[in-house]
Amino acid sequence: MMNCDLGAKKQVISSLKKIHSITNAFGAFGTYDIITKLESSNEQSIRSGISKGMRKIAGIKSTMTINIINNKGFSR
């Protein structure tokens, strides 16, 4: 989840498309401006996508990362 500079949402989402581990990115209303989903078979690829990719994009003010453990919980 991330907050962007005013008016930067469209440009940030376009830049997020270039990061391989990001599978989805959506504009949002509320506490966060954009919500993204990163997927990978290893944790290092996720970390790299966040630290070397997402957090270097101009227009992003802040990020919050939540790790989801696939074997805990359910989805419909």
Image (cartoon, grey):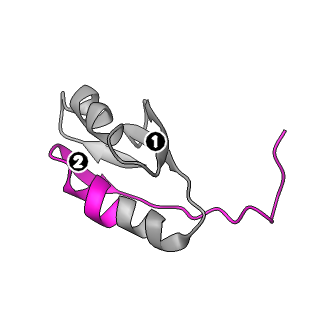
| Residue ID at (18%, 27%) | 7
Q: Pick whichever of labels 2 and 1 is earlier in the sequence.
A: 1
Residue 34: x percent and y percent?
39, 38
Q: Which residues are magenta?
A: 50-76
Rendered position, 41 above or below 58: below
Quadrant of the rendered image containing residue 6: top left
Q: Would residue 45 appear left or right of 41 to someone viewing this image? A: left
- Mark linked to residue 51: none
Query: The C terminus appears in which quarter of the rendering?
Result: top right
Q: What is the distance, in whole Å, between disc 2 and disc 1 at their CAs?
A: 12 Å
Residue 64 in the image, given as x and y percentages of width and height: 41, 59
Left or right of 21? Residue 72 is: right
- The residue that label 1 is drawn on is 35
> Would you say residue 69 sits in the magenta stretch?
yes
Residue under the point 20% across and 49% down: 57
Q: Amino acid at mark 2?
A: Ile
Residue located beneath label 2 in the image: 60
